[in-house]
Image: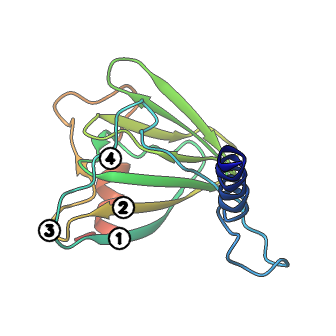
Amino acid sequence: MRTIKLVSASLLAILVSATFSAGAEYQASVKVKKLLDTGKTNLGQKIHYPGAGSAQIQSLLVELPPGAETGAHQHPIITYGYMLAGAIEIRYEGGRKKTYQKGDAFIEAVNTRHNGKNIGKTPAKILVVFIKKPENRPSREIGREKPLPGANNFSRTLHKSHPVS
């Protein structure tokens, strides 16, 4: 009898926890779609939180005209991207590449040189969210001495027009 009660309690706990998944705390009329739930970057790197102490979240809306490139850069911190419109291709040092289009969510590679390019005929719009210590810059422009294929000065322009702290 005790075993039956234990099994019943376990099943009830599983059903209750399944009910309280992402968005379950909202009214039934509210639609919630989980965009991303991961512990790894898009290149398979394990995500490490920036450490104890204060944290800062910064978000940007990045828009690349057709054919525009970000320029070679890297992110020393956790960076979340969500494609609001258009399509981009990101080329990484070592030859790997990833393509994202409207509706795709991703965690960008950490400390890995890359260059993003709008490969569509319309502007690409990306919601970018940085999770960092307040003193960290969210990205570093690099590679002027050794650019990735197709990289240009768009990254420098982006950082001047959207200063980050």
- Residue at x 67% of width, y 41% of height: 120
Work out whether mark 2 precedes mark 4 in sequence or the reverse, and give the earlier one. 2
In the rendered view, how is the structure colored?
A: rainbow
- Kindly state the secondary structure of the residue where label 3 is placed: loop
- Residue at x 53% of width, y 30% of height: 98
- Kindly state the secondary structure of the residue where label 1 is placed: strand
Quick one: which residue is furthest to the top in this view? 95
Real-space Cα separation, disc 3 to disc 4, in angstroms: 25 Å
Along the line of sight, the residue nearer the viewer: 149 or 28? 28
Examine the rendering and report whether any part of residue 31 can be seen.
yes
Real-space Cα separation, disc 3 to disc 2, in angstroms: 12 Å
Along the line of sight, the residue nearer the viewer: 37 or 128? 37
Q: How many marks?
A: 4
Q: Residues within 10 Å of mark 4 (few under 14, many from 20)?
A: some
Q: Which residue is mark 3?
A: 135
- Asked if residue 143 lies left or right of residue 96, the reply is left
Q: Which residue is mark 1?
A: 57
Real-space Cα separation, disc 1 to disc 4, in angstroms: 26 Å
- Residue at x 73% of width, y 62% of height: 19
State whether residue 86 is above or below residue 132. above
Q: Residues within 10 Å of mark 3 (few under 14, many from 20)?
A: few
State whether residue 41 is above or below residue 138. above
**Label of residue 130 in the image:** 2
The reply to whether discs 2 and 1 touch (Cβ–Cβ < 8 Å) is yes
Q: Amino acid at mark 1?
A: Ile
- Image depth: mark 2 or mark 4 in front: 2
Q: Quadrant of the C terminus?
A: bottom left
Q: Which residue is mark 4?
A: 153
Real-space Cα separation, disc 2 to disc 1, in angstroms: 6 Å
Work out whether mark 2 precedes mark 1 in sequence or the reverse, and give the earlier one. 1
Q: Amino acid at mark 3?
A: Glu
- Asked if residue 3 lies left or right of residue 62, the reply is right
